[in-house]
Image: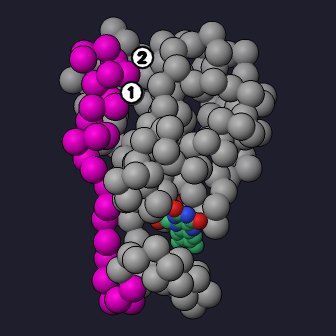
Amino acid sequence: MLKVLILYSSTDGHTYKICKRISERIEKSGEADIATIADANIYNLDSFDRIIIGASIRYGKHNPKVYEFINQNLQLLESKDSSFFSVNVVARKQDKNTPDTNPYIQKFLSKSEWKPKRIGVFAGKINYSKYGFIDKHMIRLIMWIGNGPTDLSGEYEFTDWAAVDEFSDKLVGSI
Ligand SMILES: Cc1cc2nc3c(=O)[nH]c(=O)nc-3n(C[C@H](O)[C@H](O)[C@H](O)COP(=O)(O)O)c2cc1C
């Protein structure tokens, strides 16, 4: 049975939610474990057939711990059928929702030595009420600049769950 480890970096939990969805999909035909990048060392990474790393964007960056983990485990990642996905709100735009067109994926690929076999990019979520004063107003400004929703009482989930499912199915080779 295919064994998959999903490692993630998330600040507000949306990347974790996407990981849960991926794991549920994988578990139709295999086994999937989910852990934060910080907890990855509790696993014997070599015992998994596939490794997936998912990370969200905050102020233009993936968490530096993601790059640290990748650098420390580069050989292993290259030797497995490994995948990467990024979660950001720029990906809500039709012209920025593929690995080739999303600026954060392009930045990731230029910064990381790892060339994942599969790459995904998913639009995230904005939940203004969860953020502190500065983040709330910074995000609102970013959304205003990008013609996104600016109502501070709103919660906006932009994720295309069908695209997440397709990514998961390709990963286990069912499509
Ligand atoms: C403080 C903050 C900064 C963010 N900066 C960016 C950004 O620069 N570009 C972007 O596309 N999305 C940005 N986002 C949107 C997040 O990527 C999105 O909310 C995502 O769903 C967060 O995932 P997480 O809950 O797993 O951390 C930001 C969100 C917050 C709260």
In magenta stretch: residue 143: no
Q: Is residue 15 left or right of residue 106?
A: left
Residue 143 can be seen, yes or no: yes
Q: Vertical placement of 62 versus 20: above or below? A: below
- Which residue sits at x=35%, y=89%? 151
- In 3D space, how far apart are the residues under numbered discs 2 and 1 (Cα atoms)? 6 Å
Q: Position of residue 165 (x, y in %)?
A: 26, 36
Q: The magenta stretch spans which residues? A: 150-175
Q: Are marks 2 and 1 in contact (CB under 8 Å)?
A: yes
Residue 78, image x and y in percent? 65, 15
Of residue 75 and residue 20, the one placed in the foreground of this image is 75
Which residue occupies 72% across, 22% down?
A: 74
Residue 158's spot in the image, x, y percent?
32, 61
The residue at which mark 2 appears reads as 3
Extreme front residue here?
Answer: 95
Question: Crowding near pointer 2: few (<14 within 10 Å), some, many (20+)?
Answer: some
